[in-house]
Image: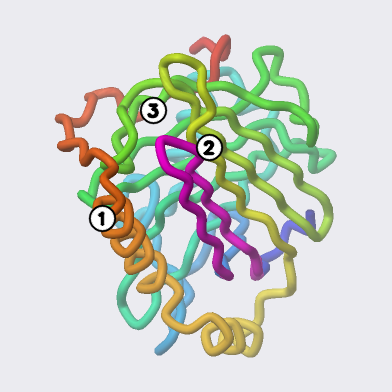
Amino acid sequence: MVIVPQLYLAQVMHKRLFPKENSFHYGVYYLALPLPALPIPGPFAGFHARDIGKRDGSDPLPWVRAILEDYGLNTKTRHVVLVTMPRILGYVFNPVSFYLCLDEKRDLRAVLCEVHNTFGEQHSYLCAKPDHAPISPDLWLEAEKLFHVSPFLERNGIYKFRFDLSQDRLGIWIDYYDVKQNKQLVTSLTGNFTPLTQRSLNRAFWTHPLVTLKAITLIHWQAFRLVMRGIRYIIKPLQSPQKISATRNLNKM
């Protein structure tokens, strides 16, 4: 992966397996920004640090570094690349942003997945191997589900994460298993990197119009469809005070 700002053109896929099958997919684009990152102003699509991390306007790099330090991964990490959806016409909703943590050889050592729900809450899952070795494309990493996202899934069970990063391509797979170890939801984000320029950003805006508004609209549309199909709606529990968690066997230092 080239350590310069890039545009990530991708396809999102969600598929619910039971109690009733439901699936959808659509095209999106993300910004891939080495940290620290400068603001990207613009009338159509842009980036503001207040949308991610501590959400106080500061660059998220010190926040990410502090988390990596807690788990002994900071010295293994040379570059941190943020993959996040842009702010569109002043509006942003990022279901999940990814901080790709690369070593000096640009191998992937960890991924911090920053998840937002539609209630304005946030939780981050740190994905890495217990021995801090590079993450291979065929490796699945497990983490306990601690954050309420969908009102149609319990806040328990586990997530399984897989990441495949190459020079010009990124694939991310996140599957959800319920407390009985039944796979209930499969998701993927797969696409290619291309140089980020004002021209490519403007082109993405017009080829994927109102992408963040589209994301939040589709979330509510799919929720409506599930309700109409008789899927039980789960009232949101109080958020856990734990805002950072890690994959299994990855212990704090």
| Amino acid type shown at disc 2 | Leu
Would you say residue 105 sits in the magenta stretch? no
Question: Label 1, on which residue?
Answer: 228
Nearer-the-camera pick, 139 or 166: 139
Residue 21 among those drawn in magenta: yes
Mark 3 is on which residue type?
Ile
- Spot occupied by residue 62 in the image (x, y as percentages of width and height): 46, 41
Label whose residue precedes the other's in the sequence (3 or 1):
1
Q: Are marks 2 and 1 in contact (CB under 8 Å)?
A: no
The tag earlier along the polypeptide, 2 or 1, is 2
Numbered tag placed on residue 112 in the rendering: 2
Q: Position of residue 239 (x, y in %)?
A: 20, 31
Q: Which mark is residue 244?
A: 3
Q: Nearer the viewer, mark 2 or mark 1?
A: 1
Distance of label 2 from label 1 (alpha carbons)? 35 Å
Residue at the (64%, 64%) spot, across then down: 10
| Main SS category, magenta section | strand
Q: Is residue 147 above or below residue 221?
A: above
Q: Which residues are magenta?
A: 7-27
Find the distance from the CA under tag 3 to the CA under tag 1. Answer: 34 Å
Q: Residue placed at 48% from the left, 75% from the top?
A: 40
Q: Secondary structure at mark 2?
A: strand
Can you tell which of label 3 and label 1 is closer to the viewer? 1
Q: Secondary structure at mark 1?
A: helix
